Image (spheres, helix red, strand yellow):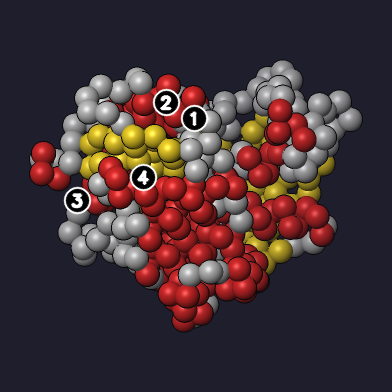
Amino acid sequence: MTATSERRVVVAGAGNMGRKWIDTIAATPGARVVGILDVDAAAAAAAAGTLEGPGVLVGTDIAGLADLIAATGADVVMDATIPAAHHAVTATALRAGCAVIGEKPAAQTLAQALSLCAGAEVYDRLVLVSQSRRYNPHVDALAAHGASLGGLGIGQTDFYRAPHFGGFREEMDHPLLLDMAIHPFDTARYVLGAEPVSVYCRSFNPPWSWYRGDAAAVATFEMDSGAQYTYNASWCSDGAETSWNGAWRLNGAGGTVLWDGESEPVLDGAPDLDPRASAAGASRARSGIAGAWDAFLSALDAPATTPRPRGHIHENVLSLAMVEAAISSARAGLPVAIDDLLERARERALADETDPAVRERLAGWGAVRDHLLGAGRTAAVG
């Protein structure tokens, strides 16, 4: 990246994640934080004070984000706000001509996420959701091993932790599914190479739980490849805890892959399978938010015909759909078809949309799944 292509970034959100993003961006040659937005003026000023170089402008109101973008000449917005603010921040940034990289989820609801997909199309800008746990060389190796097995039929994640967060998570109706499950759901789509079709989920709260809402769940997804993916999880299980990435098992025609969430995945396959060969496709890219940031910058600089990076909003929406479908199934006690959920979300998005151009684009889509998987496969101008 040359000095003439410097990326000027406004960071929205100066909390813990916002500060991590500020540090990551500041350490990147050719990128500079030029503005910080946070409802807490002291937090925004403190974050700005950690940066060297020209003065960083600060703001405290999402309604003033467009003005902050104009005043700084920003071409990128990094959204580290709470999920309830994601739609407003991203929609404003798109209308102001900025590309956006944001923390998961893409938006607080699936309907809002579909609105942002249409907005990215209307304003021809890249929106990437940082599913940071997918940027992990062990996950790449897990996917590579799985692909070597000649077709996967079973995927499973066991996740057992006992975090005492305090605060809002312990008061949520579905803390595990809403706040954590999107990570393994997104990873499952990647390593299985398949998309969700339906889900049956049962959520519950063990009697010893310190959460008000359901802190445990079992969800089984049917994938379009015919594979079944099962998520067995609890946020109130002391003892023998798994990794924060969970413990994974993939089973296919040629054997099984196991991953403890921390070490290299282990392939137990047919005698003619070479674990070293299947793992050769594992990425050596950076992990976590640094990996997401690198992918975002590469996509911005890529030719218009280049495939978009994983995590771009059209691709990411189906991970959020898995979360909403699992919660819907748990509430109803019945299986939920993902396509039905997507179409209802589009109806809600059309009813709520205030941007006429975005509403028109949404209304012009065909089936939502087909549009998400088929449209926008190449990079936006961004």
Task: Residue 177: give x, y in percent of width and height.
Answer: 68, 44
Distance of mark 3 from mark 4, alpha carbons?
A: 24 Å
Camera-nearest residue between 39 and 152: 39
Q: Are marks 1 and 3 in contact (CB under 8 Å)?
A: no
Q: Quadrant of residue 145?
A: top left
Residue neighbourhood size for the residue with mark 2, other residues' Cα within 10 Å, grouped as few (<14), some (14–19), many (≥20):
some
Say whether marks 2 and 1 touch (CB < 8 Å). yes
Front one among 279 and 232? 232
Q: Nearer the viewer, residue 165 or 326?
A: 165
Query: What is the distance, in whole Å, between disc 4 and disc 1 at their CAs?
Result: 14 Å
- The amino acid marked with disc number 1 is Ala
Residue at the spot of label 4: 68
Q: Which mark is residue 301?
A: 3
Q: Which residue is mark 1?
A: 41
Q: Mark 2 = which residue? A: 45
Which comes sooner in the sequence, label 1 or label 3? 1
Secondary structure at badge 3 equals helix
